[in-house]
Amino acid sequence: MEFWVYENWTHKKAIVHNAACSHCNHGEGKQASDSGENGRWLGPFENSEDAYARAEATRRTEIRGCKICSP
């Protein structure tokens, strides 16, 4: 299984997602295009432990799993 982290600069958070999550869409997100102004997708990661380690490395205020897919 593959995992991704969305690092959101605006809201100071890093959220870990299962790649198949509708919010993640294998690192493509939900938007048709991305301005790159609010954040970025990091990954893919082979396991959730690596994804959480990368999320922690962003040093964002909020670090957690997605409320939809919660890996």
Image (spheres, rainbow, N blue to C red):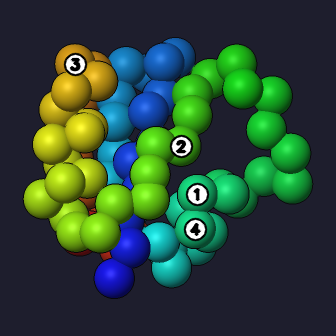
Above or below, 40 relative to 38 = below
Residue at position x 22%, y 69% in the image: 47
Question: Residue at 86% across / 45% down in the picture?
Answer: 33
Q: Amino acid at mark 1?
A: Gly
Residue drawn at x 53%, y 43% as measured from the top left: 41
The answer to the question of whether label 2 and label 1 lie on touching residues, with beta carbons closer than 8 A, is yes
Residue 26 at least partly seen: yes
Residue 47 vertical placement versus 4 (above, below) = below
Q: Which mark is residue 7?
A: none
The secondary structure type at the circle numbered 1 is loop
Q: Amino acid at mark 4?
A: His
Marker disc for residue 27:
1
Q: Which mark is residue 41?
A: 2
In the rendered image, the vertical position of residue 44 relative to residue 39, given as above or below: below
Q: Earlier in the sequence, mark 3 or mark 4?
A: 4
Image x and y of residue 58, in percent = 29, 24
